[in-house]
């Protein structure tokens, strides 16, 4: 029976909002007409805006791009193109706006409310002051009210501005709050209301209003603490800190280490009974006595840093262990790096499990990630947030061949990369395609093709640098245990959707024992690795052997390799996966490279890219020739792969990269964290319901910087657990996207 498979793309978006606004035309974007000046009475206002009325017939203004007035200096609307203007001139004149809700309030139910307010720089040629709000300025829920005069309305609104907050010119401020309905109110009213006990308590000003929001709170986010992901024997936890850096053979901490250590400081502050033993280690290079002293000094550097950050000395002690207690093979560079480490041991009733720290390291606040473009990308901070000074620059080197390509650039015609690739891979057994942790659009392109590749018969996916691949087989979804590469939500989704489709995953990168075996075999063969290190050559050989193991079991197996490097051959570097696969299995691997036509951190860019004008992933082809940029090494031009995909320059509608939404329909909304009493900045992480939020890679992650941040989440249909995390607490809630 032929297996029918419908592939669910990450980029299919929901038509249902995370929150349903009960206010019609809440941003005033729907209108019957657009006045060009201030209105004379409330009837004109009602005629201009569908649904909205002036309940006391005062001349509330509808402000659009056509609006012109010598009395008031305009500001930009909070969102969209339109807003409302209202004035309070004491008890004798006050303007309001009112509308009927989509449905009446339900007595006993809790509601969240917000609206945005701003003020002009001047009104009637008088500079706007900064008057204080009062507890009778806000939003009132009531039955239908209507008056025949323009005087101030006597009532106490349920949602009010904070009394000590000032109305400021040219600054949009949010007025928000929650309340429990005590009547079946049908309408809302916004403005300054009269306090019968203090009639002079009135804010006199002209102000702008926009984005009115009322939502019934069906589910509230509840505070929670993550479970201890890793089991700890007794009350002793051993935690290895990564990203603690020293100069070679020195013990002074480099500044790159501070971010990691600052996280430890926060954990210790939250857990005052925690004590830490700092254990320093080195690799085996150097004399024993020297290594011992070096490890002690490095542990002491961490100790002094923590003390300087306010941790009491009696909670800390340190020791050096030199090259003893190695955790990896000191005969390899990778093993030596693992052995140069700082380890912490805590004996505490408030033991912090390693999993919590790993999660916080994976998705931290951007202010702590300024020098880490990859982790910024993982929390929805794209190339606009990168610090290019901390990203290696590889200026483009012009070769004669590339110059010739550029001169004949017009002969190459753009084609949809998806169609070209699928037509070729249909007849190909092993495909290798490039990824990039800095460019999630590469992974998104792979994700779009997975379903088609499955239909073409591909059943195996090889992943490099993946740890604990058995967890994918056991759980069916990616976890933090799989390694840093897979913390990116889109890369995680490749694993999740691939598992759902029926792909079998295997590790392309060799284990330590496989690597040692490969080095031994190549040494016996007296293999000349050229410019490569012996270890690098062994990695490629062992990777090819992992593919061969599958082919021996299943001769016609179709295999997809997802790797950061897709180089087939380079001058002086004869060892690649493609070469070994050809040598042992007589299979010509198809390699696919990917490039952005715009790289914000490249000082010198390929001139071909500068001349391109594309709107989707594109392959340039002239008859049967596909344009692949050349590389020049050792005075020789080298074409390092078979096919090259060019991605268009990113745009950012709704503050998210366009490649996330190019094939879906998204309604403009986001999870409003203010109603859950979260502070800023706040990380918002969406997990598929049923997956362990202490382990799983989220479907999407965003950081909201402040209450003006309109960055939305992007999710396929389904049931989710949303985790909110600010600097002091975590909360969790369930939601459904349909």
Image (cartoon, grey):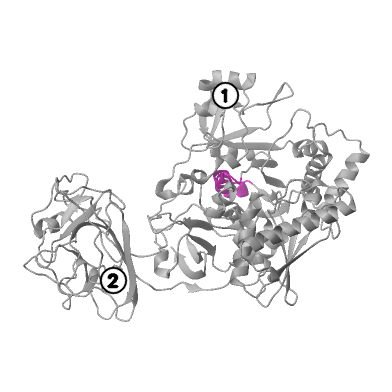
Residue at the outermost right position: 524
Quadrant containing the C terminus in the rendered view: bottom left
Residue at the image point whose x is 51% and y is 52% from the top: 380
Say which of 353 and 434 sits in front.
353
Which dot marks residue 225?
Answer: none
Horizontal placement of 487 versus 658: left or right?
Answer: right
Magenta residues, as a range? 437-456
Q: Is residue 358 visible?
A: no
Horizontal placement of 704 versus 246: left or right?
Answer: left
For the stretch drawn in magenta, the main secondary structure is helix
Horizontal placement of 320 versus 227: left or right?
Answer: right
Say which of 359 and 579 sits in front.
359
Point out residue 272 in the picture as x, y percentages from the top left corner. 62, 74
Point out residue 237 in the picture as x, y percentages from the top left corner. 72, 70
Q: What residue sits right under mark 2 in the picture?
A: 159
Is residue 18 one of those drawn in magenta? no
Q: What residue sits right under mark 1 in the picture?
A: 623
Up the image or down, 669 lies above or below 353; here it is: above
Give the quarter of the image for residue 212: bottom left
Point out residue 59 in the picture as x, y percentages from the top left corner. 11, 58
Horizontal placement of 581 versus 387: left or right?
Answer: right
Residue at the image point whose x is 72% and y is 51% from the top: 252
């Amino acid at each position: 029976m032929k297996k029918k498979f419908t592939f669910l793309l990450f980029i299919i978006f929901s038509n249902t909002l995370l929150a349903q606004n009960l206010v019609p035309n809440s941003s005033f974007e729907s209108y019957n007409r657009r006045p060009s000046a201030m209105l004379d009475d409330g009837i004109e206002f009602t005629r201009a805006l569908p649904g909205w009325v002036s309940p006391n017939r005062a001349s509330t203004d509808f402000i659009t791009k056509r609006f012109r007035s010598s009395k008031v200096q305009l500001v930009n609307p909070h969102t969209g193109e339109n807003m409302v203007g209202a004035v309070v001139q004491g008890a004798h004149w006050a303007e309001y706006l009112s509308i009927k809700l989509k449905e009446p309030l339900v007595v006993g139910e809790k509601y969240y409310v917000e609206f945005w307010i701003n003020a002009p720089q001047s009104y009637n040629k008088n500079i706007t002051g900064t008057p204080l709000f009062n507890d009778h300025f806000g939003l009132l829920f009531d039955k239908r009210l209507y008056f025949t005069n323009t005087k101030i309305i006597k009532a106490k609104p349920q949602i009010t501005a904070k009394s000590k907050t000032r109305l400021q010119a040219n600054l949009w401020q949010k007025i928000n709050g929650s309340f429990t309905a005590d009547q079946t109110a049908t309408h809302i009213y916004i403005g300054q209301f009269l306090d019968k006990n203090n009639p002079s308590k009135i804010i006199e000003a002209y102000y702008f209003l926009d984005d009115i929001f009322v939502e019934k709170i069906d589910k509230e986010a509840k505070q929670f603490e993550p479970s201890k992901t890793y089991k700890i024997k007794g009350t002793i936890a051993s935690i290895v800190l990564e990203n603690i850096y020293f100069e070679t053979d020195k013990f002074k901490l480099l500044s790159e280490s501070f971010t990691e250590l600052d996280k430890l400081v926060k954990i210790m502050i939250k857990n005052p009974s925690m004590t830490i033993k700092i254990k320093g280690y080195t690799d085996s290079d150097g004399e024993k006595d020297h290594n011992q002293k070096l490890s002690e000094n490095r542990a002491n550097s961490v100790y002094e840093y923590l003390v300087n950050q306010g941790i009491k000395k009696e909670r800390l002690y340190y020791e050096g262990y030199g090259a003893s207690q190695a955790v990896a093979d000191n005969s390899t560079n990778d093993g030596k790096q693992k052995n140069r480490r700082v380890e912490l041991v805590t004996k505490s009733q408030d033991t912090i499990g390693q999993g919590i720290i790993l999660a916080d390291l994976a998705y931290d606040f951007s202010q702590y990630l300024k020098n880490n473009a990859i982790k910024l990308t993982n929390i929805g901070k794209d190339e606009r947030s990168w610090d290019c000074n901390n990203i290696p620059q590889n200026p483009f080197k012009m070769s004669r061949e590339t110059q010739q390509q550029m001169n004949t650039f017009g002969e190459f015609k753009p084609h949809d990369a998806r169609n070209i690739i699928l037509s070729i891979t249909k007849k190909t057994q092993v495909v290798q395609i490039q990824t990039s942790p800095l460019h999630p659009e590469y992974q998104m392109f792979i994700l779009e093709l997975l379903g088609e590749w499955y239909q073409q018969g591909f059943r195996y996916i090889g992943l490099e640098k993946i740890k604990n691949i058995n967890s994918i087989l056991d759980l069916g979804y990616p976890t933090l245990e799989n390694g840093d590469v897979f913390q990116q939500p889109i890369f995680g989704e490749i694993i999740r959707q691939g598992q759902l489709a029926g792909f079998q995953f295997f590790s392309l990168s060799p284990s330590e024992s496989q690597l040692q075996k490969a080095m031994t075999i190549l040494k016996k063969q007296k293999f000349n690795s050229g410019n490569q290190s012996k270890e690098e050559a062994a990695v490629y050989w062992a990777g090819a052997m992992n593919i061969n193991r599958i082919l021996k079991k299943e001769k016609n197996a179709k295999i997809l390799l997802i790797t950061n490097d897709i180089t087939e051959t380079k001058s002086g570097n004869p060892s690649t996966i493609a070469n070994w696969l050809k040598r042992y299995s007589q299979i010509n691997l198809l390699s696919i490279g990917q490039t952005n036509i715009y790289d914000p951190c490249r000082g010198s860019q390929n001139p071909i890219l500068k001349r391109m004008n594309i709107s989707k992933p594109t392959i340039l082809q002239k008859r049967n020739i596909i344009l692949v940029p050349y590389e020049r090494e050792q005075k020789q031009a080298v074409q390092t792969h078979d096919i090259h995909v060019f991605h268009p320059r990113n745009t950012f509608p709704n503050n998210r990269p366009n490649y996330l939404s190019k094939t879906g329909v998204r309604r403009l909304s986001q999870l409003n964290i203010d109603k859950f009493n979260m502070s800023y900045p706040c990380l918002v992480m969406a997990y598929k319901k049923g997956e362990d939020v202490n382990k799983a890679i989220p479907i999407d992650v965003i950081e909201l910087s402040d209450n003006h941040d309109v960055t939305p989440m992007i999710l396929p249909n389904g049931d989710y657990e949303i985790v909110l995390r600010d600097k002091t607490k975590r909360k969790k809630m369930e939601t459904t996207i349909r």
